[in-house]
Image: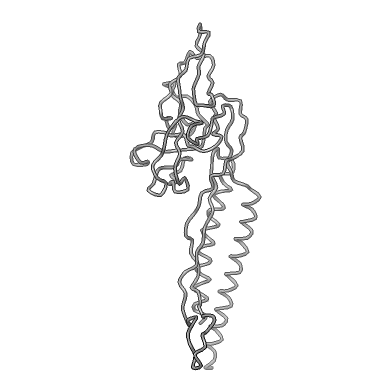
Amino acid sequence: MAINALQSAASGLSALNTALDVTANNLANVNTPGFKASRVNFQDLLYVEKAQPGALNQNEDQRPIGLYVGLGVRVSGTQLDFAQGAPQATGRPLDVTINGQGFFRVRVEDSLGSGGYAYTRAGNFALNSDGELVLANDQGRRLEPNIQISPDAETVTIAADGRVLVTLPGQPEPEELGPLELSTFVNPAGLKQVGENLYVETAASGPPTTGVPGSEGRGTLQSAFLESSNVDPTRELIELIRTQRAFEMNSQSIRAADESLRSVAQLRR
């Protein structure tokens, strides 16, 4: 009956509302360094079986098709897109982009991340009051392993293999402080998003494998560049329009089901 249509359309409106929220978040983070866009995945719900395929009639002929009426849709999950964002030249030696796979590891509270660690693709680093490399955000998460740069350093260079080289006054050769390390996961899409451009390990992502850049499939580093968000504004706007139109069509389904119920209710008059 029309009541099933009402329920199916209502589930569609709820799922599309979630899709709209995800698209809005993607667009809001179009300028967030290292941000990875999310995609909403949908799946259909249970079906009411009114006729089974393969059933025999009186002549023992099989029914070639069944008769099923679906009960709507729901969001099955959000899937992260870890395609690399475009490198953006900044000229700052402490800005680092990862060319390839891998995450920087930073120290967080034990309650936030597994083992007190979180992972990020954002390479906008700065120095704190102790000369340590930290994320240049409101929390200043400290990079792990800890890299401490002397305030007397004249130049700082981060090599492709993660070595941090500093030039000190009176020393002709640079001093090596590194290396920066990268962590990789078997299933990065299974990482948990906790805000601040950070991800934490989950059972779905698997444990991290940490090593120097350029080894065992890890990406290399490029100093004075910053990885941009991989959000494609054009694609997101198209998805926004598609979501709006689907929302309108589900609204029309509710109106049509309501009219059918109204007609049934007026039959006895």
Q: Position of residue 228 (x, y in %)?
A: 59, 38
Up-down: is 34 above or below 47?
Answer: above
Q: Nearer the viewer, residue 109 or 191?
A: 191
What coloring was used for the rendering?
A: one colour
Tell me the quadrant of the picture where the C terminus can be found: bottom right
Up-down: is 100 above or below 178?
Answer: below
- Taking the spot 41% from the left edge, 42% from the top edge, the residue there is 200
Q: Position of residue 250 (x, y in %)?
A: 57, 69
Label count reads 0
- Taking the spot 63% from the left edge, 64% from the top edge, the residue there is 245
Determine the image quadrant of residue 31: top right
Q: Nearer the viewer, residue 111 or 162?
A: 162
Q: Nearer the viewer, residue 118 or 19?
A: 118
Up-down: is 260 above or below 93?
Answer: below
Q: Position of residue 120 (x, y in %)?
A: 47, 38
- Taking the spot 48% from the left edge, 87% from the top edge, the residue there is 56
Residue positioned most to the top: 170
Q: Position of residue 149 (x, y in %)?
A: 45, 19
